[in-house]
Image (spheres, rainbow, N blue to C red):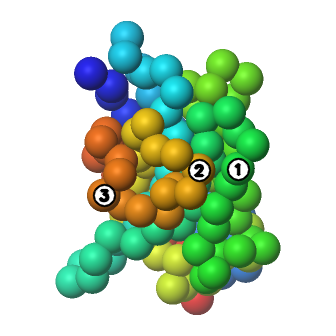
Amino acid sequence: QVQVEESGGGLVQAGGSLNLSCTASGRTFRNHAMAWFRQTPGKEREFVGAISWNTNVTRYADTVKGRFVISRGNVRTTALLQMGDLKPEDSALYYCAAGEVPARLLTGRIYYNYWGQGTQVTVSS
């Protein structure tokens, strides 16, 4: 079993920056990709960014490309989402996910087995 936990959400003004951190743990956590998704009330959970287990491949949603950067720590059990030039439409509950997902499928929500509880990001205008 793998446990996933996010941290770092909060309130920020438009144009500002915020970093989200995700930590995965569990004896079965090995070659897991890690990803961030977000959800607002009444909408489906949408892909934000992902990084492959060996950090060679990253993927981003078009809406965040050029503003968000995803990376992994040296021990690969952590994933950092650096969010810049934030906009009010970035406000959402952000979820970290982990799974043994091949690089070609990183954007697919259904391929991730383990999810955190979410951390709220609110961007004021």
Mark 3 residue crowding within 10 angstroms, few (<14) / some (14–19) / many (20+): few
Instruction: Say which quarter of the image contains residue 44.
Output: bottom left
Residue type at tag 1: Val
Task: Tell me the mark number nearer the camera, choosing from 3 and 2.
Answer: 2
CA gap, disc 1 and disc 2: 7 Å
Tell me: residue 73, above or below residue 64: above
Q: Going from the N terminus, do you reach mark 1 or mark 3 first?
A: 1
Determine which quarter of the picture holds residue 50: bottom right
Which class describes the residues within 10 Å of circle 1: few (<14), some (14-19), or many (20+)? some
Residue at position x 73%, y 23% from top? 74
* Circle number at residue 57: 1
Task: Characterize the local packing of mark 2: few (<14), some (14-19) or many (20 or more) Cα atoms within 10 angstroms.
Answer: some
C-alpha span from label 1 to label 3: 19 Å
CB under 8 Å between callouts 3 and 2? no
Report helix, strand or loop for mark 3.
Answer: helix
**Residue 35 screen position, x and y as percent:** 51, 51
Residue corresponding to mark 2: 103
Secondary structure under badge 1?
Answer: loop
Instruction: Say if mark 1 contacts mark 2, CB within 8 Å.
Output: yes
Residue on which the image places disc 3 = 110
Quadrant of the image containing the C terminus:
bottom right
